[in-house]
Image: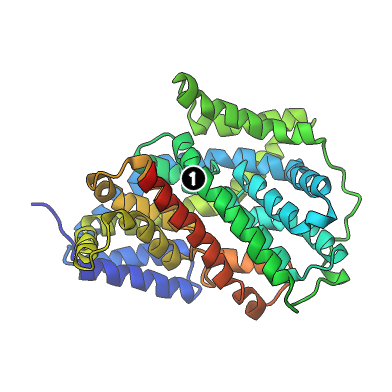
Amino acid sequence: MEIEISTIGALIGLILAIVLIISKIQPTYSLIIGALVGGVIGGATLVDTVNIMVGGAKDIISSVLRILTSGILAGILIKTNSAKKIADSIVSTLGNKMAIVAIAISSMILCAVGVFVDITVITIAPIALAIGQKTNINKMAVLLAMIGGGKAGNIISPNPNTIAISENFKVPLTSVIVENIIPSLVGIVVTILLAKFISLKKLENITNSDLSEDTNEKLPSFLASILGPLVVIILLSLRPLFNINIDPLIALPIGGIVCAISTGNFKNTREYFNFGLSKVMPVAVLLIGTGTIAGIIKTSNLQSDFIALLDATNMPIVLLAPISGILMAGATASTTAGATIASSTFSSAIIDANIPPVSGGAMVHAGATVIDSLPHGSFFHATAGAVNTDFSNRLKLIPFEVLIGLSMTITSVIYYLIK
């Protein structure tokens, strides 16, 4: 007999997980508790609920493995100062007159080559704050330029979100990345316009205490810094160009090793591996938790009820993809968790609606950037800390972040409809 969990049970479990996350309970445990409660309330026995949760976690393991290996590239880019050099080169090239453009683009590129979005903001912040003070740009405009640039880069990056989506929709990683290039470009334009608008406001100024004291840090050359990410791009491009499949599990670590060699830091790879693992481990563990709640949701009637709701309101079925990304990312305050739950839960329904898997995955991913930075998630606080601002000031940026995410999501939907 097939186990079926009620929509009410699944929703109660998801809401409980959200409440626990907001209450500062560890997110992975919050998701596991929510999954357990949702399954039992939804009509499954305790044994069946646990089996569904375990099955959901198993479904995510291939993504977790690839995410763990992606930490090699991210760790080496950060520890060799390659990430900082890439950002510094872009800012220096564009100059003070295009400060906001430079900050946004450097954040976009850094995130796009494989650095996680929160670490991207933390890495660029010292450079961005220095140029912001020099050009008399307020702190909130600088922060929005970094966040918006990171969002734009996030949807075209070989990062945990994209890996999870490509796995759940069973499409090549490069295909999901390429599909969102145009939405990403729209996102960076909207980011620059909004950041310039905010720069005209009388908001929190950048002071000397906000600036980094380490101004003589030795950085590698730009070519050495960018070589590793270029190798990753080339390796991942072999599949669409020549039908040679190099899995991200292989391509990302190779790019990291190349970066370590090109910057003359190969002898420190063991240290960099440990650092990279420390950065991806929280994401990997979080995804296991998302797998448990995704298993419950997938087994429930939520998919069919959601589609019925779209029909009842005469909304096109294509909106299932972006709306699921928006809601799940907002619920977990995480692009990665939101994209994972949404793609794992709704991928079958999206494909059954005759939406191509690549387009469906891209729309889910874009949607997951709309309300992913709410205060019950770590990104909100990490980015506030990066520029030394308080809760209320950081909160003021959320409407602008929503606009950036919506611009990319709407573009992703339009791109699917017209192509």
At which x and y percent is residue 419?
39, 41
Q: Residue at x 82, y 45 (%)?
A: 93
What amino acid type should be assigned to the residue bearing mark 1?
A: Asn
Q: Residue at x 48, y 29 (%)?
A: 247
Q: Residue at x 59, y 33 (%)?
A: 253
Q: Image quadrant of residue 295?
A: bottom left
Q: Image quadrant of residue 198?
A: bottom right
At which x and y percent is residue 309?
22, 66
At which x and y percent is residue 115?
63, 46
Query: Which colour style is shown?
Result: rainbow
Seen in the picture, residue 366 relative to 113 is either above or below; the reply is: below
Taking the view exactly as shown, the residue that stands out farthest to the front is: 418
Figure disc tally: 1
**Residue 308 visible within the image:** yes
Seen in the picture, residue 296 relative to 274 is either above or below; the reply is: below
> Is 301 positioned to the left or the right of 412 in the image?
left
Q: Which residue is mark 1?
A: 180
Of 118 and 143, the residue lying toward us: 143
Local SS, label 1: loop
